[in-house]
Amino acid sequence: MPRSVGQLYGRWARCVERAPETVTLSGKTVIYRINVKRKVDDINEKIKAVNEFFFKRNLDFTVDDKKLIIKTEKDMKKIVEMFGDKFKQLLGLDVDVIETEEADKERK
């Protein structure tokens, strides 16, 4: 479970390490010790974390008021659009996806 990401009490959390004595057994109660390093308040840092979690890559983006504009290559556009509801639910931002040729060139 190291480096896993999930929600804990309605907040995003990432497990960096776990105690070696903690073992997950079927049907048993497991108690985890959680060490909270800091609270993430910066919207750009939150967006980067969500992009990394959903897409496993760093996508170019800009934020205007309550709108998140993500720049991506052609083949990723539909996939990013599918996660628009999740961005709205997690961050409270509407998502617009812009297909750019620069992103395609960087990938090659």
Image (spheres, rainbow, N blue to C red):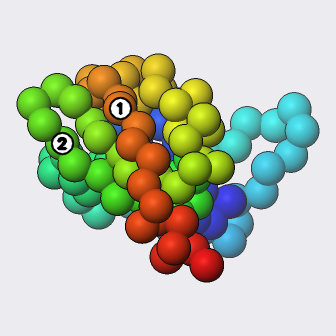
Q: Would you place residue 94 above or below residue 3 in this image?
A: above
Residue 79 horizontal/vertical position (percent): 61, 38
> In the displayed structure, does residue 62 sit left or right of residue 21?
left
Sequence-wise, the earlier of marks 2 and 1 is: 2
- Residue 20's label in the rendered image is none
Label 2 belongs to which residue?
63
Q: CA distance from mark 2 to mark 1?
A: 10 Å
Question: Which residue does the image show at 22% across and 49% down from the upper left?
Answer: 62
Q: How many marks?
A: 2
Query: Which one is in front in this view, the residue at disc 2 or the one at disc 1?
Result: 1
Label 1 belongs to which residue?
96
Question: Which residue does the image show at 29% across and 40% down from the upper left?
Answer: 69
Three-letter code for the amino acid on which mark 2 is drawn: Val
Secondary structure under tag 1 reads strand
Does any portion of residue 52 appear in the rendered image?
Answer: no
Q: Would you place residue 56 above or below residue 47 in this image?
A: below
Q: Nearer the viewer, residue 103 or 94?
A: 103
